[in-house]
Image: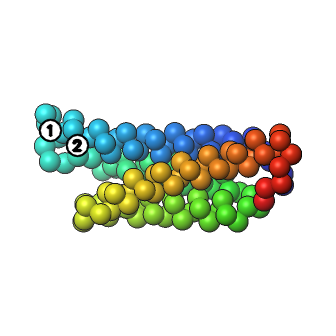
Amino acid sequence: MKISHSHNKADYVGILGSLLCIVHCLAMPVLALGSAFGHDHHLHVGFLSLDYLFILINAAAVYFATRNHRSVFVNVLLWSALVLFAVSLIFEERNAVFQWLGYLGSALLITGHLINLYICQIAPQTKLKVS
């Protein structure tokens, strides 16, 4: 398996993007209680919500992390987690279950990127056969 440094950078970006989204989703309702945001717990930049920015960051990270990657497990895990994450963020206003599914999607993205880092960095150094 050809390993490039872009995989590693994409994994780090994906982990950071997912962690920032979790922090944002946990912190905004608390901050909104005492601020002028009122009941709207999303920070908007013009018409664009930060949720969409998190989706774009994670989509780019998953694309670059899985590009030219042979591990079907990692590819399926990361792309499935991204779809769950994106759909949950888009529909979280409709039902509270989508908020919890968004947290699950973030956790799965972090897990997938950590597994990918293990496969690309640690396993080759210990000469383990992982594919």
Q: Image quarter for residue 117?
A: top right
Q: Image quarter for residue 80?
A: bottom right
Whether tag 2 and tag 1 are in contact, CB under 8 A, the answer is yes
Looking at the rendered structure, the kind of residue marked 2 is Pro
Residue at image x 13%, y 34%? Answer: 34
Q: CA distance from mark 2 to mark 1?
A: 7 Å
**Residue 45, can we see it?**
no
The location of residue 6, given as percent across then percent down, is 71, 43
- The N terminus sits in image quarter: bottom right
Residue at image x 60%, y 40%? Answer: 12
Looking at the rendered structure, the kind of residue marked 1 is Leu
Residue at image x 76%, y 41%? Answer: 122
- The C terminus sits in image quarter: bottom right
- The relative height of residue 102 versus residue 18 in the rendered view (above or below) is below
The location of residue 31, given as percent across then percent down, is 21, 35
Taking 107 as reference, is 74 left or right? right
- Per the image, label 1 sits on a secondary structure element best described as helix
The location of residue 128, given as percent across then percent down, is 83, 49
Residue at image x 63%, y 56%? Answer: 63
The location of residue 73, given as percent across then percent down, is 67, 63
Total tally of numbered discs in the picture: 2
Q: Which mark is residue 33?
A: 1
Q: Residue furthest right?
A: 127
Check disc 2 and report the residue beneath it.
29
